[in-house]
Amino acid sequence: MGAPEGILCTKTHEYVYEKDGSYLVGITDYAVEQLGDIVFVELPEVGTELEKKEVFATIESVKAASEVYMPVSGKIVEINERLLNEPELINSDCYEEGWLIKVEPASLESDLEDAMEYEDYISDVEE
Protein backbone atom coordinates (compact mmCIF):
# COMPACT_ATOMS: atom_id res chain seq x y z
CA MET A 1 0.00 0.00 0.00
CA GLY A 2 1.92 3.00 -1.23
CA ALA A 3 1.28 6.52 -0.06
CA PRO A 4 -0.37 8.81 -2.65
CA GLU A 5 1.69 11.47 -4.36
CA GLY A 6 1.60 14.84 -2.62
CA ILE A 7 0.62 13.42 0.76
CA LEU A 8 1.69 15.31 3.87
CA CYS A 9 2.05 13.67 7.28
CA THR A 10 2.17 14.87 10.88
CA LYS A 11 4.32 13.73 13.79
CA THR A 12 1.13 12.29 15.33
CA HIS A 13 0.70 9.97 12.28
CA GLU A 14 -2.18 11.66 10.46
CA TYR A 15 -2.06 12.41 6.76
CA VAL A 16 -3.75 14.93 4.51
CA TYR A 17 -3.81 15.03 0.73
CA GLU A 18 -5.91 16.50 -2.01
CA LYS A 19 -7.96 14.15 -4.16
CA ASP A 20 -10.59 15.30 -6.66
CA GLY A 21 -10.85 18.74 -5.05
CA SER A 22 -11.32 17.45 -1.49
CA TYR A 23 -8.79 17.02 1.28
CA LEU A 24 -8.72 13.51 2.69
CA VAL A 25 -7.51 12.90 6.23
CA GLY A 26 -6.62 9.59 7.82
CA ILE A 27 -3.86 7.73 9.62
CA THR A 28 -0.63 6.63 7.97
CA ASP A 29 0.34 3.08 7.10
CA TYR A 30 3.01 3.30 9.83
CA ALA A 31 0.30 4.08 12.43
CA VAL A 32 -1.85 1.23 11.10
CA GLU A 33 1.09 -1.15 11.47
CA GLN A 34 1.62 -0.03 15.09
CA LEU A 35 -2.07 -0.39 15.97
CA GLY A 36 -2.63 -3.84 14.53
CA ASP A 37 -6.12 -5.05 13.59
CA ILE A 38 -8.60 -2.18 13.78
CA VAL A 39 -11.98 -3.16 15.21
CA PHE A 40 -13.84 0.13 15.79
CA VAL A 41 -13.80 3.72 14.53
CA GLU A 42 -15.64 6.70 15.99
CA LEU A 43 -15.96 9.61 13.56
CA PRO A 44 -17.27 13.18 13.99
CA GLU A 45 -20.48 14.65 12.60
CA VAL A 46 -20.43 16.21 9.13
CA GLY A 47 -20.42 19.98 9.49
CA THR A 48 -18.25 19.98 12.61
CA GLU A 49 -15.59 22.69 12.55
CA LEU A 50 -12.36 21.85 14.31
CA GLU A 51 -8.99 23.46 14.92
CA LYS A 52 -5.68 21.91 14.01
CA LYS A 53 -4.52 19.42 16.69
CA GLU A 54 -8.06 18.88 18.07
CA VAL A 55 -9.13 15.25 18.46
CA PHE A 56 -11.65 14.33 15.75
CA ALA A 57 -11.79 10.53 15.88
CA THR A 58 -11.01 7.49 17.97
CA ILE A 59 -9.66 4.28 16.51
CA GLU A 60 -9.70 1.07 18.50
CA SER A 61 -7.57 -1.90 17.61
CA VAL A 62 -7.01 -5.25 19.29
CA LYS A 63 -3.99 -3.60 20.98
CA ALA A 64 -5.17 -0.12 22.00
CA ALA A 65 -7.47 2.85 21.48
CA SER A 66 -5.94 5.92 19.86
CA GLU A 67 -7.13 9.45 19.38
CA VAL A 68 -6.73 11.00 15.95
CA TYR A 69 -5.88 14.69 15.63
CA MET A 70 -6.80 17.22 12.95
CA PRO A 71 -3.77 17.91 10.72
CA VAL A 72 -5.46 21.15 9.56
CA SER A 73 -8.20 23.43 10.86
CA GLY A 74 -11.42 23.21 8.93
CA LYS A 75 -14.93 21.91 8.45
CA ILE A 76 -15.75 18.24 8.05
CA VAL A 77 -17.61 17.88 4.78
CA GLU A 78 -17.83 14.09 4.64
CA ILE A 79 -17.00 11.07 6.77
CA ASN A 80 -16.10 7.63 5.44
CA GLU A 81 -19.28 5.88 6.56
CA ARG A 82 -18.03 2.51 5.31
CA LEU A 83 -15.61 2.46 8.24
CA LEU A 84 -18.46 2.36 10.75
CA ASN A 85 -19.25 -1.21 9.60
CA GLU A 86 -15.90 -2.08 8.03
CA PRO A 87 -13.14 -0.55 10.21
CA GLU A 88 -10.72 -3.14 8.80
CA LEU A 89 -10.61 -1.09 5.56
CA ILE A 90 -8.05 1.07 7.38
CA ASN A 91 -5.83 -2.00 7.76
CA SER A 92 -6.15 -3.09 4.14
CA ASP A 93 -5.89 0.35 2.48
CA CYS A 94 -5.54 3.36 4.77
CA TYR A 95 -5.12 5.81 1.87
CA GLU A 96 -7.72 4.95 -0.78
CA GLU A 97 -10.49 3.01 1.00
CA GLY A 98 -9.67 3.70 4.65
CA TRP A 99 -9.55 7.50 4.78
CA LEU A 100 -11.44 8.92 7.76
CA ILE A 101 -12.81 12.34 6.82
CA LYS A 102 -12.90 14.91 4.04
CA VAL A 103 -12.12 18.44 5.17
CA GLU A 104 -12.68 21.91 3.78
CA PRO A 105 -9.52 23.52 5.20
CA ALA A 106 -9.65 26.95 6.83
CA SER A 107 -5.96 27.90 6.55
CA LEU A 108 -4.30 25.06 4.70
CA GLU A 109 -0.96 26.67 3.92
CA SER A 110 -0.12 27.87 7.44
CA ASP A 111 -1.51 24.69 9.04
CA LEU A 112 0.74 22.51 6.90
CA GLU A 113 3.97 24.38 7.62
CA ASP A 114 5.03 21.70 10.12
CA ALA A 115 3.77 18.74 8.06
CA MET A 116 6.27 16.44 6.38
CA GLU A 117 6.42 14.78 3.02
CA TYR A 118 5.90 11.03 3.32
CA GLU A 119 9.57 10.06 2.87
CA ASP A 120 10.64 12.53 5.59
CA TYR A 121 7.89 11.30 7.89
CA ILE A 122 8.99 7.66 7.49
CA SER A 123 12.64 8.55 8.19
CA ASP A 124 11.50 10.55 11.23
CA VAL A 125 9.41 7.74 12.77
CA GLU A 126 11.99 5.05 12.04
CA GLU A 127 14.83 6.87 13.83
Image (cartoon, grey):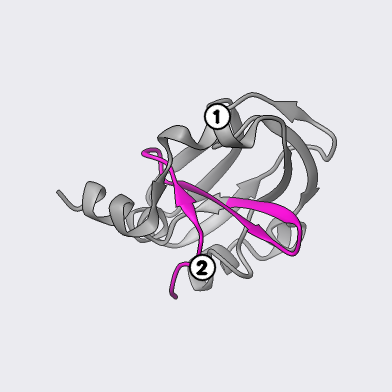
Q: Amino acid at mark 2?
A: Pro
Circle 2 SS class: loop
Mark 2 or 1: the one toward you: 1
Q: Is residue 23 magenta?
A: yes
Residue tagged by mark 1?
110
Front residue of 39/91: it is 91
Q: In the image, what residue occupies the spot 43% across and 73% down?
A: 2
Above or below 98: residue 109: above
The front one of 80 and 4 is 4
Q: Do the CB atoms of the residues marked 2 and 1 lie less than 8 Å apart?
A: no
Magenta-tinted stretch: 1-25
Q: Residue at x 44, y 62 (%)?
A: 37
Residue on which disc 2 sits: 4
State the image coordinates of residue 57 (x, y, percent, origin top left): 61, 39
Q: Quadrant of residue 34?
A: bottom left
Does residue 78 show up magenta in the picture? Answer: no
Residue 51: percent from left, percent from top: 64, 24
Q: Residues within 10 Å of mark 2 (few under 14, many from 20)?
A: few
Residue at x 51% of width, y 37% of height: 112
Q: Secondary structure at mark 1?
A: helix
Residue at 55 percent across and 63 percent down: it is 90
